[in-house]
Image: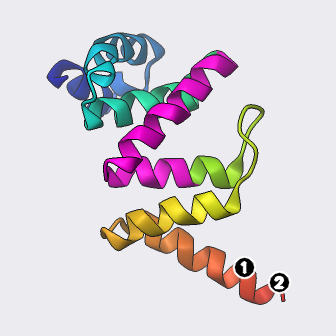
Amino acid sequence: MTCARWLLDHPRLGQGLPAQRLASQLLKRPARLGMTEAQSRLGDLLSTAGCSGRDRLAGIAMLRDAAQHGDTDAQFRLGVLLLNGNAEQAVDVLQARHWLEAASQQGHEQAQGLLLSLQAQRVTSR
C-alpha cells in the first residue's frame, strides 16, 4: 500500500501509465481484503484510466464500496462520475448528489463547491 501510494502521489511518476499499472497491481490485494484506501485509489485508477468497460465498472464498484465506508475522496469521485456518466454508467443526478452531499458534510471542499455550482445551475434554469 505504501509503495502504491508513493507511486501515485509522485508528481512525475504518478501521471505515467507504467506507474499507474504497477500501483494498480499493488493495490488489488489490499482492495480485495477490504482496505478502504486501497479500494478508493484502485477504484479511481480503474474508473478513469481503465482500458475496458469491465475495468471501469469494477472501478466504480470499488469507489462505491470505499464511499459507503466513509472515504470522502471516493464519495466525491463517485459523485462526479455519476454526474458526468459515460458509456458504462448512465448519468444519475440523484445518486451523484447523495455522494457529493456525503463528502460535503465531511468537509470535502471540492464537493461543497460542486454542490454550490449545481444549486446555482438549478436556480438559473428555472
Numbered circle sitting on residue 125: 2
Q: In this view, does 3 lie to the left or right of 97?
A: left
| Helix, strand or loop status at disc 1 | helix
Q: What residue is shown at x 43% (from left), y 53% (from top)?
A: 75
Q: Is residue 87 left or right of residue 116?
A: right
Residue 77 falls within the magenta-colored stretch:
yes
- Place of residue 48 in the rendered image (x, y in percent of width and height, measured from the top left): 56, 32
Q: In which quarter of the image is residue 57?
A: top right
| Helix, strand or loop status at disc 2 | loop
Do callouts 2 and 1 mark residues in contact (Cβ within 8 Å)? yes
Residue 74 falls within the magenta-colored stretch:
yes
Numbered circle sitting on residue 121: 1
Magenta stretch, main secondary structure, is: helix
The chosen color scheme is: rainbow
What is the magenta range? 52-79
What is the CA distance from the residue labelled 2 to the residue labelled 1?
Answer: 6 Å
